[in-house]
Image (spheres, grey):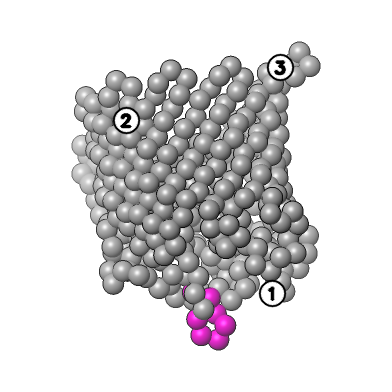
Amino acid sequence: MKSAVLGAALALTALPLSAFEYFEAEGEISFQQRQFAETGLMGQSKSQTSVAIEPELYWETEEGNSSFVFSPFFRWDSLDDDRTHGDVREALWRHYDSNYEIRAGIGIVFWGVTESQHLVDVINQTDAVEAIDGEVKLGQPMVSMGWEFDDSLLDLYLLPYFRERTFASNDGRLAFPGLGDTEAQYESRHEEWYPDVAGRYSLMWDQWDFGVSAFHGTNRDPYFVQGLSNSVQPYYALMSQVGLDVQAIFGDWLWKAEAIRRFSLDNHTALTGGFEYTYVGVNDGMTDLGFLVEYLYDNRGEKAPVAGQNDLFAGLRWVLNDLDGTEFLVGGTVDIDNSDSVTVRLESSGRFSNDWSWTVTGWMFDSDTPSDPVYSLRKDDFLEAEISWYF
């Protein structure tokens, strides 16, 4: 897997860069400390230190209609050998002309509008050793083309290679007992070389933004099957999915929803929907306070292998609107069917200067039900502080 991705990146970097007129190099180095409240279920340490680097090289032609970006990523972790890893986040060539764009290489594509989860986001694989919320993605080999119309966009994708999800080792934190370093299984005999296809049509109309998407290929979300010696193996089935995402702004209200119908080993429907109301100028000041509420539904009910099957998310977002871009978000999700299943998260960020920034993230997990996906994380409450330098 790694050799294929690195080979694609090296092939792309062999492009005739002499044809490019403009060049820019920048990047980020991050220093991260995680502190857990308890020793892990498998005796893992309460402290986890890591350092990450993500440079970005950018070329552009003199005409300005073609560009190439190369962004590798590497993290060293003190606790988990599987979290010490590298990836090519982007190695993407773009060509623009009138109303269309061609892209080829390795890239990251994000679909979604809701806060608590992103059901329609199916192009990239999750880099699960980086973040528990699934927000960090692995680079995806792709060839794609996009067309821009008056009020809409159409993007089509061919994805020739599949990336397996990363997982923490038994020595690391946020690890799932029995998973370890087991080998993945596939439904397709082509395994990771099964070609995926996807497309999305988006439309902007007055205050409304609509997105309709479709995907066929290898499911980015693995099933888990029992292996030898009580081990657990990821199983990547084929799947087809259609999705819809909608958001609308009415004054201080932002309404948003995502819904999917997925056909795989278990056909199911899922949706997430809600609103964010922003109180602008709290106490006649410059800060804004946002109230978020979302409902998460999955028709598989309590048999669903995901946490959001009949859950309610609520949160507060405080934006200081200062020169340092300081923001805070605190929110929690509770299972309506099983009120002892609760997750709470804190996200905060800001800048020390133009070159230095900080983030503080926290998670708390609580569940007394062994069949609940949150149950395996019940000893993994943690606080994560990160300082980043931009060069």
Q: Is residue 46 left or right of residue 73?
A: right
Occupied quadrant, residue 110: top left
Residue 153 is labelled as 2
Camera-side residue of 61 and 234:
234
Figure disc tally:
3
Q: Can you see residue 126?
A: yes
The picture places residue 199, in percent across and down from the top left corner, at 31, 43
The magenta-colored residue range is: 227-233
The picture places residue 346, in percent across and down from the top left corner, at 70, 44
Q: Secondary structure at mark 1?
A: loop
Residue 42 is labelled as 1
Residues at circles 1 and 2 in contact by the CB criterion of under 8 Å? no
Label 2 Cα crowd, 10 Å radius (few <14 / some 14-19 / many 20+): some
Camera-side residue of 336 and 143:
336
Residues at circles 3 and 2 in contact by the CB criterion of under 8 Å? no
The picture places residue 197, in percent across and down from the top left corner, at 28, 51
Query: Mark 1 belongs to which amino acid?
Result: Met
Query: Mark 2 belongs to which amino acid?
Result: Leu
Residue 281 is labelled as 3
Q: Is residue 22 left or right of residue 110?
A: left
Label 1 Cα crowd, 10 Å radius (few <14 / some 14-19 / many 20+): few
Query: Mark 3 belongs to which amino acid?
Result: Gly
Which residue is pictured at 74% across the width and 53% down the height?
Answer: 339
Q: Can you see residue 62?
A: no
Give the number of the mark in front: 1 or 2: 2
The picture places residue 63, in percent across and down from the top left corner, at 23, 26
**Residue that lies at the very extreme toward the top in this rendered image:** 284
